[in-house]
Image: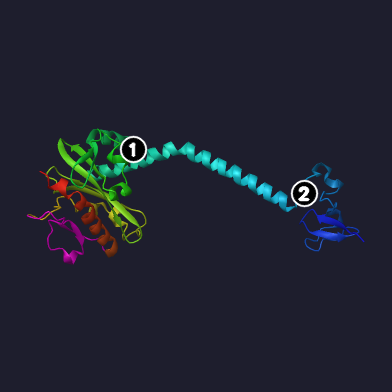
Amino acid sequence: MATKKFRCKVCGYIHEGDTAPEKCPICQSPSSEFEEITESGEENVHHAGKKGLNTNGNTYTIIYSSIIVVIVAFLMAFVFQALKPAQDANVALDKKKQILAALNIRDISDKQAADEYVKDITADAIIDAAGKTVAKGSEGGEKSGFKLNSADYKAGKLALFVCKVNGETKYVMPVYGMGLWGPIWGYIAVNADKTTIFGAYFNHESETAGLGAEIKDNIAWQEQFKGKKIFKNGSDDVALSVLKKSDVKDPTTQCDGVTGATLTSNGVSAMLKDCLSKYKTFLNEK
């Protein structure tokens, strides 16, 4: 004998029988809260306007979920494309501020940074390991060396920012390496003699706050690089390095490490040696 199905409108419980139960065994709602479900899945006359749509079926659930996923994906793609120009502009501005920080130009507004970059950067050139200029770049440039990243650097394309600060020529070179927990990077500015550090800026992706993160947060630590030499007299090997304070024997080329962050300090030291060595031919050209 065929039985009827009744659905509790409060909790969704399905009851099978000739009539609706006096009380829902799940939510204790009275029988008046039950509605009959026909064999075709259509709910009874209480909701006549909903006939033809079985919202309890798997097909409905799959179609509904698919439509929602497509709509959300479309909205996310639209928002991403709409915001991308602003995101790219912010990334470019942040990079300019980092380059300017290596030139000891810090704590300035976004507009000041944009203006200073145009005024101080005379070329964003690209050179190779032989010191040959691949692209000259342009004043306030953002198209040549400015566009390079760590992958280009590994491929032998070396960014070189030629600068004028208070009428004096400076060269800024990006450096890339690994800290304790992830990538670290920075910019090293040298005077026109190509061996004396004019300024330095370092950043990181995920070093520990108060320890390895000090390479970015501790301005005094970055400023100790000022006046250091990249090479020892009579040698063209990169001697600029970061060591434990007790191991610093040559203060002209060696800097104190960050207290409590030995591995990150070693990462900075290795980054300087590896990256500046690629510029060795350029730096030794007088």
Residue type pointed to by label 1: Asp
Q: On the picture, is 183 further left or further right than 25?
A: left
Q: Residue at x 84, y 56 (%)?
A: 6
Q: Residue at x 33, y 55 (%)?
A: 183
Q: Which corner quadrant of the image does residue 143 belong to?
A: top left
Callout 2: helix, strand or loop? loop
Disc 2 to disc 1, C-alpha distance? 57 Å
Main SS, magenta region, reads loop
Label placed on residue 54? 2
Residue type pointed to by label 2: Asn
Q: Per the image, is 256 magenta?
A: yes
Where is mark 1, residue-wise?
A: 110
Image spot of residue 122 (x, y percent): 22, 34
The stretch in magenta equals: 234-259
Q: Earlier in the sequence, mark 2 or mark 1?
A: 2
Work out whether residue 248 can be spotted.
yes
Q: Which corner quadrant of the image does residue 255 belong to?
A: bottom left
